[in-house]
Amino acid sequence: MSLDQDFDNEEEESEGKEMSFLSHLEELRWHVIRAGASILVFAILAFIYIQEIYHYVIIAPSQPDFWTYRMLCKLSEVTGYKDLCVKALNFKLQVIGMGDAFTMSMTSSVIAGLVFAFPYAFWEVWRFIKPGLKPAERRSARGAVFYVTFLFFSGVLFGYYVVSPLAINFLANYTLDPSIINEFSLASYISLVATLTLACGIAFQLPIVVYVLSKIGVLTPSFMREYRKHSVIVILIVAAIITPSPDIYSQVLVAIPLFLLYELSIIVSARVEREKLEEEKRLAKLGNTNTED
């Protein structure tokens, strides 16, 4: 949260100063360059330790002793639903092309750089946006970098530890015929894990999106409460799509956090509406005072 306050004094001094269109573009360019440089730095660090990253992070969900699979086995003992327990993953990963291993190392390093540099990259974007906000908007948006970062990493962890293992387990054990052996390319495996993980990181930004839409008057808490039942159906459909596994337990594990995010979004929207009403009352009071004078 301190990142939001580091340049407050500087921004307050520059507030009100008009900038030309080209000046705005120049400022945006440097923010983008710094954000891109941070991603590059983390990507280089990831490439240096790429073997450790592959062994302990990327390949881990393909192993039966992965944390999620062990927790599912414990859950199966509690619920009595033995199909939850993952004891084996019937597939092998392979690299086919001569340069595929090096290419996937580069790709994985960039993805890791993007994930780990996200807080700083977003902070650079926020530094460009923040001076253009009104003082009241800046106060209400205090801590934006912290909340966006927290939700992003929460989504990434959820995608890595819940969604990806469930999808891998289902696809690894799905066969057209017993004589067919599942041998997946490393590229398709990484594409699946990266897509699901980053998609969850983006999906967890729902409260932030609702906050912005509520600020501009597109969404209201009453609207979201009215369509809560519809949202449950949509969430279950989304859970069924991102978890190919047909068992209801896997879909519920994915749906519960999404539903909690929706409920959190209602609270966020209600807070925005309350702030708007208080601001309107304050302005009305000032207007009455000026009229009496």
Image: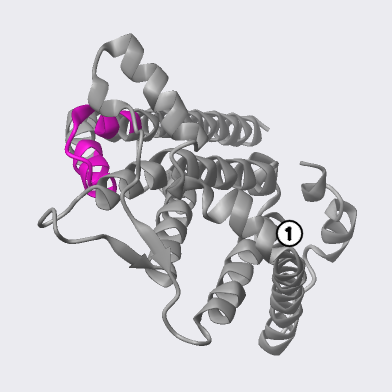
Q: Which residue is mark 1?
A: 120
The residue at the point 25 percent across, 45 percent down is 238
Please say whether residue 52 is one of the residues in the magenta stretch: no
* Nearest the eye: 65 or 290: 65
Please tell me whether residue 236 belongs to the stretch shown in magenta: yes
- In the image, is 155 to the left or to the right of 229? right
Circle 1 SS class: helix
Q: Quadrant of the C terminus?
A: top right
- Residue 101, by quadrant, is bottom right
Q: Where is residue 38? Give x, y as percent.
A: 75, 69
Where is residue 156? Give x, y as percent.
52, 47
The segment highlighted magenta reads 235-253
* Residue 85 seen in the figure: yes
Q: Position of residue 224 (x, y in %)?
A: 29, 34
260 above or below 205? above
Residue at 46 percent across and 60 percent down: it is: 194
Residue 208 can be seen, yes or no: no
Q: Is residue 38 above or below residue 200?
A: below
Q: Label 1: few (<14), some or many (≥20) within 10 Å?
A: some
**211 left or right, relative to 55:** left
Q: Nearer the viewer, residue 200 or 85?
A: 85
**Residue type (three-letter) at the residue carrying disc 1:** Tyr
Where is residue 63 shown, x and y percent of the image?
46, 45
Q: Residue drawn 34% across and 13% down?
A: 77
The quarter of the picture where residue 196 lies is bottom left
| Viewer-closest of 166 and 25 | 166
